[in-house]
Amino acid sequence: MADETPPEGNGTEAGEVVEAAEGAEGTEVPALGEREQALLDRLAAELGDGVVEHAEACGDLVVRVRPDSWRRAASVARSELGCDYLSFVAGIDWMPAEPFRGAPGGEPSQPSQPSDTAYGAAGSAGRFQVFARVQSTTDHHGVTLKTDVDESDPRAESWVEVYPGADWHERECWEMYGISFDGHPNLRHLYLPSEFQGHPLRKDFPLLAREVKPWPGLVDVEGPAGSDEAEGGDA
């Protein structure tokens, strides 16, 4: 009789329920549904140790892969999982946002923003990640894929050759997070002028909207020509 004991490893092998995401309280990763487990098994069979970790989030499968398996993961998702539709490619900055400065009574948002770094489903190796959502328009299943990005040299492999629609999304991610995509045909600005410096969706970018300031009050407005207001007279 064949040995059915799951193989050991730090990633997600076919048929294995990963317990690597145990937190301080010893919480285990919830078991996947039958469909999600089948998708994970196919990914693991093709990518091997390229699969780092997985999780279930709101009933959906989330899989983190190694950076050097990122483009390969796209190909597997399309050819082996039948995910013919790319919903999005985006960046994540897990750095805690700075509190609003000058807000009476402290942080005004509800719920309060975390002060410590807390990574989402399937974990992270650092501050930045790229993630993407792909789906099957015929079988009606999907998977969220994510990979780690080096903070000192933020870059990931481009998905444009596999999903041409990634062109626009990767340009936006490059512009807003400063993450380059190796193999992208033409990384150029979508929203900002070419001379703009900085990346507005990074948590440390100094957005004025993050500062709470007193209401400046009414602004003096000059009246129509010939009126008392225009001439400075009293009404």
Image (cartoon, helix red, strand yellow):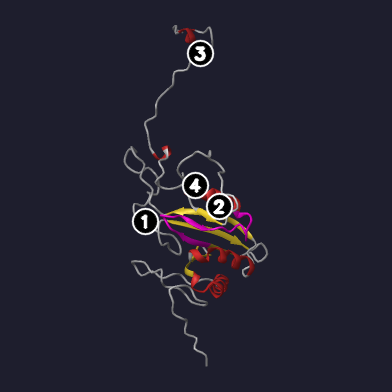
Identify the residue shown where x is 41% and y is 71%: 20
Work out how far the residue at label 1 is from the one at label 3, CA to CA, in angstroms.
53 Å
Identify the residue shown where x is 61% and y is 69%: 81
Amino acid under disc 4: Met
Disc sitting over residue 170 in the figure: 2
Residue 122's quadrant in the figure? bottom left
Work out how far the residue at label 4 is from the one at label 3, CA to CA, in angstroms.
42 Å
Q: Earlier in the sequence, mark 2 or mark 4?
A: 2
Work out how far the residue at label 2 is from the one at label 4, CA to CA, in angstroms.
10 Å
Work out how far the residue at label 4 is from the one at label 1, CA to CA, in angstroms.
20 Å
Magenta residues, start to end: 145-166
Q: Earlier in the sequence, mark 1 or mark 3?
A: 1
Amino acid under disc 1: Thr
| Foreground disc of the pair 4, 3 | 4
- Mark 1 and mark 3 in contact? Answer it, CB < 8 Å: no
| Relative vertical location of residue 72 with respect to residue 102 in this rendering, above or below | below
| Foreground disc of the pair 4, 1 | 4
State how many labels appear.
Answer: 4
Q: Which residue is mark 1?
A: 117
Identify the residue shown where x is 40% and y is 24%: 217
Q: Determine crowd level at label 2: few under 14, some 14-19, many 20+ residues with C-alpha closer than 10 A.
A: many
Disc sitting over residue 176 in the figure: 4
- Mark 4 and mark 3 in contact? Answer it, CB < 8 Å: no
Q: Secondary structure at mark 2?
A: helix
140 left or right of 67 in image: right
Work out how far the residue at label 1 is from the one at label 2, CA to CA, in angstroms.
25 Å
Q: Earlier in the sequence, mark 3 or mark 2?
A: 2
User: Observer-nearest residue: 177 or 212?
Assistant: 177
Q: Position of residue 193 (x, y in %)?
A: 53, 38
| Foreground disc of the pair 3, 2 | 2
Q: Which residue is mark 3?
A: 223
Q: Position of residue 232 (x, y in %)?
A: 44, 8
